[in-house]
Image: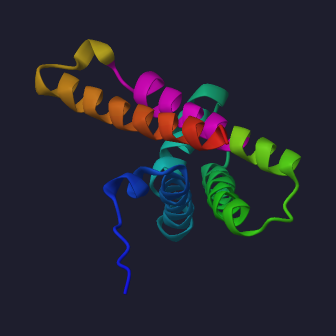
Amino acid sequence: MAQKNVSLQSLASKKALQILIAILFISMGIVGFSTGKGWGHEIANEVSKLLGKGDQEVLVYIISTVQLLCGIVLLATMFVSTIPANFTKIAMMAVWIIWLVIIVLTDILRVDFGNLDGSEWFVWIQQIVLHLIVFAGILQIQEK
């Protein structure tokens, strides 16, 4: 009986990374729908501040829908071979653009850098680095 060794490197494969990022986007979409909070809510707040008051609830649902669809597309492209390559390319571009918008809105525009003190700088650094790690992962899975 031959034994298969599962290496830790397989957990860092592009497929595993794509599954994790898909789960992240799906969970962000579900959180947005179920609670009206999460990053969708934060993005809606920032967009409302930039563009003026609007119907924030509708914006949260739109953002949550886009996040959920991005996650579903990321998973579907792994298991459904009939999805056109151009669609996959556009969907992957949408995923990294959305993540870049999240970084800009939540890590740069929302932060009052003048009032950050001591440990708050480290919390901000931690948050932006985590977001950039996910962004790097998104770019990695896009390059197939």
| Residue 138 drawn at (x, y percent) | 56, 41
Is 47 or 67 nearer to us in this picture?
67
Residue 104 among magenta residues: yes
- Direction from residue 88 to residue 17 in the image, left or right: left
- Direction from residue 14 to residue 2 in the image, left or right: left
Tally the numbered discs: 0
Q: Which quarter of the figure is the C terminus placed in?
A: top right
Q: Which quarter of the figure is the N terminus placed in?
A: bottom left
Say if 38 sits above or below 107 in the image.
Answer: below
Residue shown at the point (12%, 27%) measured from the top left: 119
Residue shown at the point (87%, 45%) measured from the top left: 86
Q: Seen from this angle, which residue lies furthest top?
A: 114
Residue shown at the point (45%, 54%) measured from the top left: 38
Say if 10 sits above or below 139 in the image.
Answer: below
Is 38 or 3 nearer to us in this picture?
3
Query: Which secondary structure dominates the residues rendered in magenta?
Result: helix
Is 22 or 11 nearer to us in this picture?
11
Residue shown at the point (62%, 37%) measured from the top left: 96
Is 52 or 99 nearer to us in this picture?
99
| Residue 81 drawn at (x, y percent) | 80, 65
- Direction from residue 144 to residue 137 in the image, left or right: left
Q: Where, by quadrant of the figure, is residue 118 drawn?
A: top left
Q: How is the image coloured?
A: rainbow
Residue 144 among magenta residues: no
From this viewpoint, is residue 48 visible?
A: no
Say if 82 sits above or below 15 in the image.
Answer: below
From this viewpoint, is residue 70 visible?
A: yes
| Residue 54 drawn at (x, y percent) | 67, 42
The segment highlighted magenta reads 94-112
